[in-house]
Amino acid sequence: MNKILAIGRRILSVLVTLWGVSVIIFVVLRLLPGNAVTAAMGVSEGLLTHAQVAALNRYYGVGQPAVQQYLSWLHATITGNLGISLSSRMAVSTLVGTALPVTLELAFFAMLLGLLIGVGFGMFSALHPGRWQDDLGQTVSVVGLAVPSFILGTVLVVFMSTKFHYFPSSLGFIGFFTDPWLNFQQIIFPALVLSLGIGAAILRTTRAAVLEVSGLNFARTALGKGVSRKAFIWRHLFLNALTAVVTMSGIQLGYLLGGTVIIEQIFILPGMGRLLITAINNRDFPVVQSVTLIFAAGFVIVNMLVDVAYSLIDPRTRKR
Amino acid sequence: MKRIVGVRGVASAILALSTAATFSASVISSGGASASQKPRAASSSFVIGTVNSVQKIDPDVVTNFLDFEALGLIYQTLVQENANLNIVPDLATSWNFSNGNKTLTMQLRQGVKFHDGSTMTSADVVASLTRAQASATADPSASYLGSVTNIAASGPNTVVLTMSHPDISVLEGLATVNMAIMPAAAISAGTIATTPDGTGPFKYSSWVPNTSFTMSANPNYWGGKVSLSSVELETIPTEQSISAALQAGTIQMGLLSQPTVVSTIPKSYKVQKAMTLSYRALQMQDRKGILSNVNARRAIACATDRKQILQDSVFGQGKVVGPVPMGPYASQPVSSICPTQNLKQAKKYLIASGHPKGFTFTAITSTDLDSTSAYQAIAMQSQLAKVGIKMNIQNLAANAYIQDWLKGTFQAAFAENGANPNPYVMYGRYFGKGATLSVPAGYTSASLQKELLAGDEVSTPAGQVKAWKKLSADLTGNAVWIWLFTSYDFAALSPSVHGFTLSPVNTTQLSSLATTSVS
């Protein structure tokens, strides 16, 4: 019964969080100067007669009471279609349905590579403190954190295209099931660029956590008992440091969902980031609201998964 | 035991990831030939990379540059502008003004078919122009038909436009894609906004918003065989990425505007440039404050070094211009008081203005709308400072700038405005009688209104040249605005592309795709 109540409370808090996000985004968007008509017409709006402006306002739904706009969008969202895009007149669910898989795939590969870099180099550093291996790990983390992804992405694109005449993303995005090999080539490079920043953060966390665990009494005891080095590293050090690594990975993954925007621009990926930027420029409120809500939902879901992961990693948390 | 399994799982994942990383590295080292040679869905598709994306597909409501380009290949108009910006036939083969230039009779081209297979008649033209003129359509070019009181068919291939007053500039208005000719049946059925159907060299195929717009060759094109089987406008968000895609061989043409990116393209690629049919100017609100003082404005005009601004903002890739930037009535000289920077004269004007030590004003820019505007402003700021004029710069987001511009709530604004070879079309909307953009224009003058009307009513070429020269002199002599320069647009082409010429008409720069081929 307590478990059911706890789950219920958690679901309720998620819904309240998402509702709060939707209200904030709705209000913030209305504070921005201009509307969909201004965005669509630019200075040409000044050439229109009052009757023409009125016709456009009706077309874009400008001038409706804010509460009515919000409730209309909320109703559409709850029923699953997310409303209609003001600029393209397509269902927002259709636009999101095309863009979301691209961003999810990019985030998935970036996270995998980030984990590989972060955990790999983090362990490597922590097991050789103060030696060249540690210095190498520290250098990788500093470079990963210091070099902005947009610079790295641009350099990579220019280098590949000028030296190898190779820029697979510019062929137009190909879905995984259409051509898995081409799809992989289109995704792996932006994922690699994104993964460096993620990997650097995980690397530092892994190193610090492993070093901390290795100084604790149980670790010394394990060594004293004569466990093998392999078992000591993976069973005693790594698994006990894993909680901190999972926490950092969860945070990074949450940010990653919204952080693909610039990389999608550079690598020409038609993902959620590009959809969002275009929608903001066009004052296409239904699209902006829906995309932001999906990003927020992604963050909340990742947090929940991190909590679940805690209980799998550390049995003590299951009893709390 | 469970923990050991967990450890193995982690190890397996790391191993898999190592393989993936190695795999990706091998892709780089192999040069990725397989990807660059991989055909698109349509192997013979001619792909054009552009930072813009098609926003709308109803020709009567488009305002976006790329919308004009895309729909300009699908739809046609009664007349068009040629490379010299003269009006030449398109769907109308001939025309004549009568009744004191108040009646325009146009003969239509015969045997023209829409993409749906139906034959174009005068009924389609009447329906199209009537739709463009209707308030409910909200056509931004409807004001071009402001003088037109009646549109009627006179036989299957003749259309007659009746105007309330002599208005020969109506022809320029009919050349814009906003006046596209479409089937009357499609207008009645309400399918124009979803399914483009014109008479142009290419037919609409598909549209993925923010991603691509694809057209296929029109086999029934009246202008002859179209070589390219299909054309795709692919949205590539940065110009650097367009350059990369061109060099990777995945696109055949890149539309560029940044000279810095153009300079990175290897010499083996062909780069064409064409003057954009727009101009950059410092617009001023001349009705209030310090800028209502004509000598203060003249001081700004004389202290400005346009050539240096052109150099600083677009690396010299353009031309210093006056109010009429190009075409048969191009302003020459570019300014009647100070064609080049003249600081001595600027100081004289300052004394005449009653502010010998200078004055302060604020200019707005929007790098969202024109990425060069901040460079223009900074260059001009330092030039004006030489005579004691302090110009504050306020950079605004696109929509904030547009709102301030439309309401005239600015002292000065760096603007990129659309141009037209016909000065009446260009400035009637700002300075003419009942001008729709009188508020952002910031200046009203009875003499300007007279000059505009006189120029529009003169029908002899010599008379028009004289009339428009007077207008240019009046605009610059009173330093109504400070006209600066017009820049180039660039098209970078793969070496295999033949027969393409970037047109200087900025709403149909791609019109020569109808005769382009790829070897």
Image: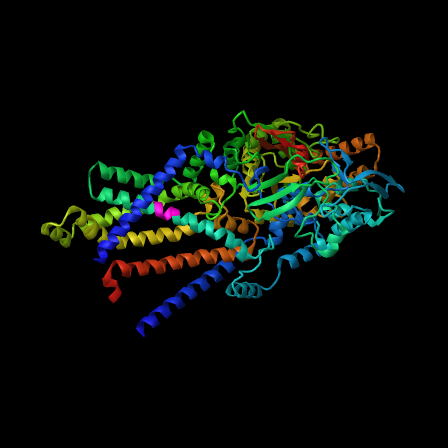
Name the residue rendered at 76%, 33% in the picture.
B86
In depth, the one of B514 and B243 nearer the eye is: B514
Going by the image, does A9 lie left or right of B222? left
Q: Residue furthest bottom?
A: A1
Q: Residue furthest right?
A: B99
Name the residue rendered at 84%, 35% in the picture.
B459
Give how far across and how far down residue A126 sits, in percent: 22, 44
Which residue range is magenta in the image?
A: A109-113
In depth, the one of A138 and A57 nearer the eye is: A138
Q: Quadrant of residue B498?
A: top right
In depth, the one of B443 and B376 nearer the eye is: B376
Name the residue rendered at 56%, 54% in the picture.
A284
Name the residue rendered at 79%, 31% in the picture.
B465
Q: Quadrant of residue B427?
A: top right
Going by the image, does B21 lie left or right of B129? left
Rendered position, B368 above or below A88: above
**Quarter placement of the C terminus of chain A:** bottom left
| B19 within the magenta span | no
**Quarter placement of the N terminus of chain A:** bottom left
